[in-house]
Image (cartoon, grey):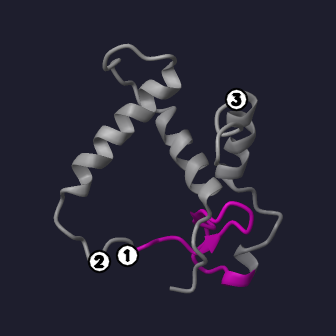
Amino acid sequence: TSWAPTPLMGRVVSLALLLKRWVVEEMGPTCCPWHTAVTAAQETLGIMQGYECATAFGSDSQYDRQCKKCGILMESGDPRRHRALAMSVNMKCPTCEGMRRINSQGVAASGSA
């Protein structure tokens, strides 16, 4: 593909935004809701790792632009727009917008990510 790899921070923030939308049960003693959600995600990813290969995964992508800051793929909303115009810095990335909210809560601001 012509897309650059999504850097670690983009992956961390996009997963954190997703995890905020989950309602998960505590699986034993946990220190906080954040680590409860991370544990649930690890369990889920472990199950998904055992699925059959999906060689066409992502090939039917509807995304036509990529954020230069976080590397997340997005839709411009107008399929007729030229890709170079869709990369305009004036278009707001929902993941980067979410990064500010997450960092204000102390998530993704600590650790090695």
Q: Nearer the viewer, mark 1 or mark 2?
A: 2
Q: Nearer the viewer, mark 2 or mark 3?
A: 3
Q: Looking at this rendering, what residue extends furthest in the right direction? A: 90
The magenta segment is 59-84
19 versus 62 height, above or below: above
Disc 1 and disc 2 in contact, CB within 8 angstroms: yes
Q: Nearer the viewer, mark 3 or mark 1?
A: 3
- At 75% from the left and 56% from the top, the residue drawn is 92
Residue 4 is drawn in which quadrant? Answer: bottom right
Looking at the rendered structure, the secondary structure element under dot 3 is loop
Taking 45 as reference, is 76 left or right? Answer: right
Looking at the rendered structure, the secondary structure element under dot 1 is loop
The front one of 112 and 83 is 112
Label at residue 60: 1
Which label's residue is closer to the chain start, 2 or 3? Answer: 2
- At 79% from the left and 72% from the top, the residue drawn is 88
- At 49% from the left and 41% from the top, the residue drawn is 18
Q: What secondary structure is the magenta-colored segment mainly?
A: loop
Taking 31 as reference, is 94 left or right? Answer: right
Judging by the rendered image, the residue that carries numbered circle 3 is 106
- At 38% from the left and 72% from the top, the residue drawn is 58
The front one of 79 and 104 is 104
Q: Which amino acid does label 1 sit on?
A: Asp
Q: Distance between the residues labelled 1 and 2?
A: 8 Å
Tag 2: Cα neighbours inside 10 Å, few (<14), some, or many (≥20)? few
Taking 106 as reference, is 34 left or right? Answer: left
Disc 3 and disc 1 in contact, CB within 8 angstroms: no
Q: Which amino acid does label 3 sit on?
A: Gly
Judging by the rendered image, the residue that carries numbered circle 2 is 56
x then y, percent, for residue 27: 31, 20
Q: Which amino acid does label 2 sit on?
A: Ala
